[in-house]
Image (tube, rainbow, N blue to C red):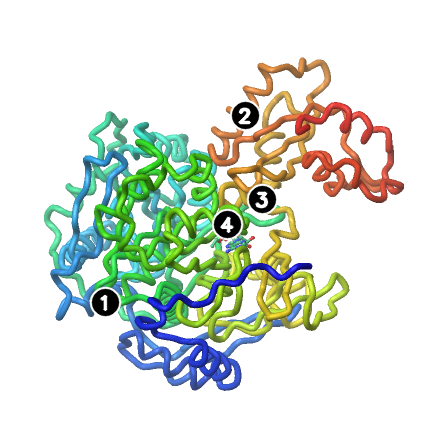
Amino acid sequence: MTASKTYPVPEAIKSSTHLNAATYAEMYTRSIEEPEAFWAQSATMLEWYKQPTKIKNTHFGKNEVSIKWFEDGQLNASYNCIDRHLANNAKKVAFHWEGDSPEDSLDVTYQEVHYEVCKLANALKEMGVAKGDRVAIYMPMVPEAAYAMLACARIGAVHSVIFGGFSPNAIADRINDSKAKVVITADEGRRAGRSIPLKANVDKALANDACPSITHVVVHKLTGGDVDWNEKHDVWWHDAVEDCSGQCEPEVMNAEDPLFILYTSGSTGTPKGVVHTTGGYLLYSAMTFKYAFDYQEDDIYWCTADVGWITGHSYMVYGPMVNAATQVFFEGVPTYPDVKRIAQVVEKYKVNSLYTAPTAIRALMAHGDKPAEGCDLSSLRILGTVGEPINPEAWDWYHRVIGESRCPIIDTWWQTETGGHMILPLPGATSLKPGSATRPFFGIQPALFDADGNELEGEAEGNLVIKDSWPAQARTVYGDHERFINTYFSAYEGVYFTGDGARRDEDDYFWITGRVDDVLNVSGHRLGTAEIESALVAHAKVAEAAVVGFPHDIKGQGIYVYVTPNEGVVADEALTKELKAWVRQELSPIATPDMIQWSDGLPKTRSGKIMRRILRKIAANEHDQLGDTSTLADPSVVDTLIAERLNK
Ligand code: WTA
């Protein structure tokens, strides 16, 4: 393999940074050799009611996994994100909210966040929400989404944010799995000029008493659009908080008390409720934020994610707010009203660090240099990416057109389960190679294993595992610790298995090659093939369905579906449309199949297992590389699938 181009740390960053190559190396070594001392010292970044004295108590095993950090410490996440800043930073802007329409914007200070969060926290208490209770949040990208999360954290309730793009069934499943008492939503959301019927989706999820645990639906009036009203449990946010005090004493939480649940897709079955706890998660998200973006006190930081995903939790709420950062909080999409929106918002707020997804970069890149034309991007110092591998073309475009060949690109590899960044370059310390997430963060020990469980040394490619625990690691799957162990700790003894493949090069840089399981990454959104398949087979005309990913220029991966219709069903264009609409409605618009191929049969082994490897090759138009098909029950099925393939 030829050596790729390397970009050294820019001079401008060197002079402002927290770290350089030598201090990174020194701190990394200490974090591995003396984890207790390293993390005890790091923990002083937070304000504790009771400083932890027990730092790390973790065990990874095939039969038993137990993860505790700072277990005798006491703190409150909302206090750390808000109250502790009031002495010096009360008037500092927490959110420059920028609406879907460029005409809408609003600045909110830390003082105002405190007031809004306290009022809602008191209102939730009045509704009977107590420490440990779950609250579902199904919100558009307005500051109220962050207030809702922080209000839960303030009273010790466990929030479960449901991405605003999910459909009623997906909402109901998530509410029922966590037995949430309250759901907080808005009348409607807005996206690229269209309205999203959030309240109506919640109504459908709750219809026919489908979610019996819910006692209240709190509705933020955003657009003023028409909504149906159910006197039994609906309450307007503004009515609920009207008589509530703007002061609410934060609940004293143990470091290991759960902070939130976030559902994410896996290889099999329904989405898993990943549980994060208070102390370790908060510290790690705050610390990675500070170092990844070389955060300086007066920086303006902008992450374009949605609070419905882990990026929105760690790098729009908890991480930046512990640091008292000023953020742009964006309701819209990068291409609305046109492809200059990102650059215009950067110019408007003089953004210093911008954190976005490769899929957004590829969508803009399709328009050449136009997305930046005539815009002043000179405030930018650091660019970040997250969610999927970034291809070198997209990296170059981002670097040249948005970063004006001046800003380092911080390619952050991590997962919902890891809580925060795991492998990433640090601005002042790491030379960059386009497409590589580079080196591990403090305390992270990545390793590569082969399929037989042998650790691979030196330059190698294999399955990516992490050898020891870190503070923000997920503690369990809500209500199913065995599933947690089976999913992440049963593949290899004594290590956390990420589900990703990776390569390590001659400089010990890591290159993430993508999922090695049946998880898809569509536009940076994580989807399980099993979820899409189960939505499809729930349709009356579908006998069997198999879902695979295929390379897609903008989305990274597209969704390719093989469907066997029921006997007597006419498989035509109309049914293709119907099935696409069905998946949108059953699961989410983000799960809409790109291609649906009809097939009378699927390639199966003699024991009846679908050979997805073959389906993936056909979907990728790489049917000349099918490999061994001799174990198939009926090899002729494959010839038909190849002849009728849709991606040519
Ligand atoms: C993928 C998102 C390559 C990876 C934070 C991982 C990446 C999954 C990167 C987690 C990256 C995330 N380079 N791949 N920089 N970041 N991924 O849980 O496959 O939504 O396992 O968390 O996204 O997706 P999740």
Front label number (1 vs 2): 1
**Residue drawn at x 61%, y 56% as measured from the top left:** 500
Q: Residues within 10 Å of mark 1 (few under 14, many from 20)?
A: few
Which mark is on residue 520?
Answer: 3
- Cβ–Cβ below 8 Å for labels 4 and 3? no
On the picture, is 469 further left or further right than 361? right
Quarter of the image that includes the C terminus: top right
Seen as rendered, the residue at the extreme right is 630
On the picture, is 463 further left or further right than 172? right
- Cβ–Cβ below 8 Å for labels 2 and 3? no
Front label number (4 vs 3): 3
Give x and y (percent) for residue 632.
Answer: 85, 38
Separation (CA) of disc 4 from disc 1: 33 Å
Front label number (3 vs 1): 1
Q: Residues within 10 Å of mark 2 (few under 14, many from 20)?
A: some
- Identify residue for label 1: 297
- Cβ–Cβ below 8 Å for labels 4 and 1? no
Give x and y (percent) for residue 544.
Answer: 69, 30
**Residue drawn at x 47%, y 69% as measured from the top left:** 430
Quarter of the image that includes the N terminus: bottom right
Looking at numbered disc 3 in the image, what kind of residue is underneath it? Leu
First in residue order: circle 2 vs circle 4 = 4
Separation (CA) of disc 2 from disc 3: 17 Å
First in residue order: circle 4 vs circle 1 = 4
Separation (CA) of disc 4 from disc 3: 12 Å
Q: Tell whether circle 3 marks a residue whose Cβ is less than 8 angstroms from ligand 1.
A: no
Residue 512 to residue 48: above or below: above
